Amino acid sequence: MTIILVTGSAGLIGSESVRFFCDRGYTVVGIDNNMRQTFFGENASTKWNRDLLLEKYEERYIHHNIDIRDREAVTKLFQDYGTDISLIIHTAAQPSHDWAARDPYTDFTVNANGTLILLENTRQICPNAVFIFCSTNKVYGDKPNFLPLIEQEWRWEIEETHPYSVGIDETMCIDQCKHSLFGTSKVAADVLVQEYGRYFDMKTASFRGGCLTGPSHSGTELHGFLSYLMKCTMLGKPYRVYGYKGKQVRDNIHSYDLVNAFYHFYQAPRIGEVYNIGGSRFSNCSILEAIQECEAIAEKKLNWSYEEVNRSGDHIWWISDVRKFQQHYPGWNLTYGIKNIIKEIYIQNTSRWN
């Protein structure tokens, strides 16, 4: 039997991974203890998503309510499935800048220690398995904010002649900058994943994503940009924009496109790789542009306000250069643009949010 192990399996990327691999006939073992509700409150609970997966894939999906920081429980699970585990997709995380500053101990133990526990069990029990880590562009800290950016009417941009005009690639330094405590814990995990690959010759990869999005996101104010923005638009809830005149730019990648990238890596894995992954120039927007799209699709006005102080370490402009991954895996392409993503979030959540 071939087992796909997914951590954070009821979250956005985790649940997309479950669906993707179950639909292709694999048996998927999920780890998720709904820590997102602990982080962000009842409205961020992923229980609804977990229940949908169990109902739809009752013969292919096996769920475990385990905390990835629990060494004994994680080790027992790895021992139970042994070398049948051929792929680990690690998406479980504390994902918020602001929350990390409130409780640095929990943030670091979840993001860094939890990743170490998973890597070591992979090395000891199923060393031939592929290990994919859902990292973040926050490993680059605020370095992107020192690029020569140009203010336009609706967004910040970079000169077309700049080397990063296509997007920021993996050569950007991660040192000597402000990361936020969240970014720091993810740096630790990211480097661990690389080192286990290089030091122990394991098939590992860190995918450094920007805004990961899709209809399965349990978006909240502190995490889940497009999902939460559309939710506020639909329900008439107030939305706050923090700093940079609302012109800060993010590339947004649909959860399906990201998991499809994981699948391509799984089919032809490499050792200790790092990839910037996101919507690139194919799928990106500023907050002001995203507000316009949400209002047009929902046919409602968003009740939003502006605060001049930006979130510490937040990016003014981020677009990923995905050409390295495309060169390694030319069969992979982005399929979801911003309008498609926002419209799908609206359609698939209308009954749940209204």
Image (cartoon, rainbow, N blue to C red):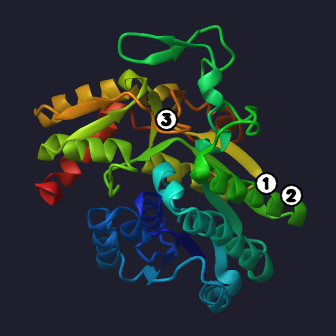
Q: Earlier in the sequence, mark 3 or mark 1?
A: 1
Most foreground residue, 256 or 222: 222
Kindly tell me whether residue 343 is visible in this rendering.
no
Q: Is there CB contact under 8 Å for labels 1 and 2? A: yes
* Mark-to-mark CA distance, 3 and 2: 28 Å
Residue, far right: 199
Most foreground residue, 343 or 335: 343
Q: Quadrant of the C terminus?
A: bottom left
Q: Residues within 10 Å of mark 1 (few under 14, many from 20)?
A: many
Badge 3 element: loop
Residue at (76% x, 32% y) in the render: 171
What percent of the width, then of the height, locates residue 259? 51, 54
The three-letter amino acid code for the residue at tag 2 is Arg
Instruction: Identify residue for label 3.
Output: 279
Instruction: Identify residue for label 1.
Output: 272
The three-letter amino acid code for the residue at tag 1 is Gly
What percent of the width, then of the height, locates residue 7? 53, 70
Instruction: Identify residue for label 2.
Output: 198
Q: Residues within 10 Å of mark 3 (few under 14, many from 20)?
A: many
The three-letter amino acid code for the residue at tag 3 is Gly
Q: Quadrant of the N terminus?
A: bottom right
**Quarter-wise, where is residue 243 in the image?**
top left
Residue 64 is marked as: none
In-image side of 91 versus 201 (left or right): left
Badge 2 element: helix
Residue at (10% x, 32% y) in the render: 299
Is 336 situated above or below 1? Answer: above
Q: Is there CB contact under 8 Å for labels 3 and 2? A: no
Q: Residues within 10 Å of mark 2 (few under 14, many from 20)?
A: some
